[in-house]
Image: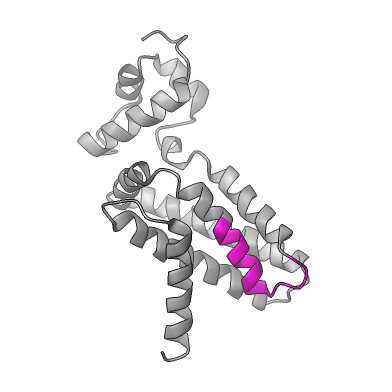
Amino acid sequence: MGRWEPDARGRLGEAALQLYVERGFEQTTVAEIAARAGVTARTFFRHFADKREVLFAGSEQLQQGLVEALESAPASATPLEAVVAALDAGAEFLGRHHAHARRRHSVIMANPELYERELIKMATLSEALAEGLRRRGVPEPDATLTAETGIVVVRVAFGTWVSRPEPTDLAATMRETLARMAAVTSGG
C-alpha cells in the first residue's frame, strides 16, 4: 500500500492498536506501526507526535463536545442535569466503536504510563466541565464536585461498558451508573 492511499491516519491507528494488543505497547515501534499501515515512519509523525498519541487522538474533540453540550443545557437545568447533558454527548462520541474501545482500554489498563495519561485526560475533562459550570454561575465547591461526579460516572460506566463482550448503549450504561451512584449515596 503506497503512502498516497487514503486514510493513512485511520490505517495507522488501526495498525498501532493491533500491534499493541499483539505485542504490547512497549514492545511496538513506530516503524512497525508504519510498516503494518503501509506508510513510512515519516508519515506516522505527520499524524501523531508519538505512539501514545494514537491512543489519545480525539481527546480535544471529546472535551469540546462535552463542554458544548453542557453549555447548551437549558438555563433552568441543575448543575447535575447540565453535566448529564455533557455525559450524553460523551457517550455518543465514546460509544461508537465498542470493539475498538475494548481493545484500546485493554492496552491502556496493561500499561501504567498509559493509565496515568488516561487519568490525566479525565482530570482535564473534569476541569473543563467545572469551568463550564462556573460560567453558568455555579459556585465552588459545587462546580468542581458536580464535574468530578460526572467524570467518575464516565469512568465507571465506560469500564462496565467495555467489559461487556457485546456492544450495548453507553448512554444507558452511564445513566444506570448515575442512578446507582444516587442509590449508594442515599443509602439505597
Residue 88, horizontal then vertical, whole percent: 56, 59
Give the vertical position of 1 relative to 47 (above or below): above
Residue 72, horizontal then vertical, whole percent: 72, 58
Residue 54 visible in the snapshot: yes
Foreground pick, 132 / 90: 90
Q: Quarter holding the N terminus? A: top left
Residue 143 visible in the snapshot: no
Residue 136, horizontal then vertical, whole percent: 76, 67
Horizontally, residue 53 falls left or right of residue 89, namely: left
Residue 79, horizontal then vertical, whole percent: 67, 73
Residue depicted at 61% across the width and 66% down the height: 83
Give the colour scheme of this rendering: one colour
Residue depicted at 46% across the width and 37% down the height: 53
What range of the chain is rendered magenta?
Answer: 74-88
Foreground pick, 63 / 50: 63
Q: Quarter holding the C terminus? A: bottom left
Residue depicted at 53% across the width and 45% down the height: 59
Residue 87 drawn in magenta:
yes
Give the vertical position of 172 relative to 188 (above or below): above
Horizontally, residue 70 falls left or right of residue 17, namely: right
